[in-house]
Image (cartoon, rainbow, N blue to C red):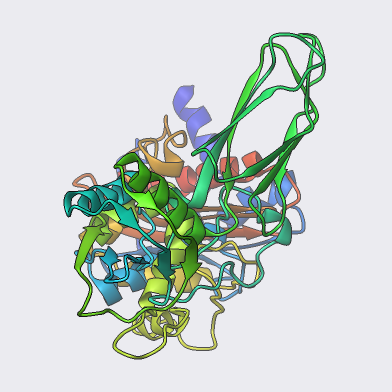
Amino acid sequence: MKAILFLCLLTFLVVGGNHPCPLVSPAAAAPLSMDEVARIVASRPALQGCGWSLLVCDLTDGHVLYAHDPQRLLLPASNMKLLTAAAALRSLGADYRYTTALEYRANETLVLVGSGDPALSTSQLDELATAVSQHGVTTVGDIVVDESHIDNTRFGPGWAWDDEIEAFNPPLGALGVDENVVTVCVSAALVPFVAPRVQVAPDGVFTLRNDAATALPDGADSLDWTRLEGRNELVVRGVLPMPSEVRSCVPVADGATYAATVLRDALRRHHVTVTGTVRRQEVAYAQAARFRVCVQSAPLRALLVHMMKRSDNYYAEQLLRTLGRRQNDAAPTSGLAVASALLAQMGLGAGTYTQVDGSGLSRYNLVTVSHLVSVLRAMVNDRDFVAALDVAGVDGTLVGRFTKSPLRGRLRAKTGTMGGVSALSGYVCDDRGKPRWVFSFIINGALGPGEDLKTLEEDLMNAIFTPLMTH
């Protein structure tokens, strides 16, 4: 009876393509047809009237197993990071490291020279401050920030204006620290009807206006805060019931100024007095500098693991800008032209797609599943690229998905999510861990809950690949 029910279930699931299939044992499920795949998608209310594309290929012979509207241009959301990662590896190399330098000039000026390092941290700026102190310096004048190494456009084209205060959308540039976000903690007061306690770490970055109040334990929670546009001014409003505590991250208005402020505080902790101000200036490297100290990032391969598995927009945008980094006396560019030339070598013809950023935040981005599969096929033998992808049911944005599926541990992919958009592209590996199939599935214009789209992705991938893996 169980076998009959299992076979009946498969009749509305998936296989496609006209390729011959070898004989299998009665226990092995036959692959589904493309018509059956389409019926799975059509049966979901959340996808009524939306656009979707699918492409699945066998990596052993290049055979197309499933294809639905593979040349349709769609919003890729964070699947755009696949293009960014591939271009970064081809242009910079897996061993590339960012260098952030601090120069001490004869006039007691400190010059902080940024390179676009997305992983620059407070602890690394503390290392630089320690080095200054160890050189016997007890007083410095101005702290000058030099952002000339990469394009310093703060935000990408087509980014939503109301996302500026979201932690996933910090300002970009050659200098930033801790991904240009601060932690805000709001704690209810011990008695009602008074303002809650607001703490911002690190201290001194934001000007604070606390218009919030503490409510009785059964009161409604209406707490909200915002950073005023273009300013490091935080406004807290609403009501927080006792004894609640709320934490969140808020982006700063300007990464370079933030980095210089963190450096200034570190210098003071190391007993170095700062008598001047923080200012911007492009400064040529001076042979007359008294000394120069540097900190470096982890290699690119490690940065990509972070970027892909956390779907980190800041890392993606900084990497894209690094492709157009300043070299010799040439002015820096956005990096898009460099990426375009590299992607053309992977089969993405100029004028066949639109890339305006590195993260996929913009709704101006347009690619096809064919483009994504082309990139994945071109990068399949790059261990660092494959290693950066999420592993289904194991880590990254797929850690809680495919947990009870045969694809757990075998599907390696990049997710993508925006309002009305869901994407999943990557590989399914054989039992030795080698990529055997490549796929891309994108949904646009869906009106249903995002959870429904993710459920469909899992159901569809299971329906397509489970028979292939047992065939």
* Residue 435, x across and y down, in percent: 27, 56
* Residue situated in front as seen by the camera: 348 or 431: 348
Image quadrant in which you'd find residue 8: top right
* Residue situated in front as seen by the camera: 376 or 437: 376
Q: Is residue 107 left or right of residue 71?
A: left
Image quadrant in which you'd find residue 320: bottom left
Note whether residue 437 is visible: yes
* Residue 33, x across and y down, in percent: 51, 56
Residue sitting at 42 percent across and 29 percent down? 404
Q: Is residue 69 left or right of residue 30?
A: right
Residue sitting at 20 percent across and 80 percent down? 287
* Residue situated in front as seen by the camera: 217 or 288: 288
* Residue 411, x across and y down, in percent: 36, 47
* Residue situated in front as seen by the camera: 126 or 58: 126
Rendered position, 201 above or below 332:
above
Q: Is residue 115 left or right of residue 425?
A: left
* Residue 354, x across and y down, in percent: 56, 78
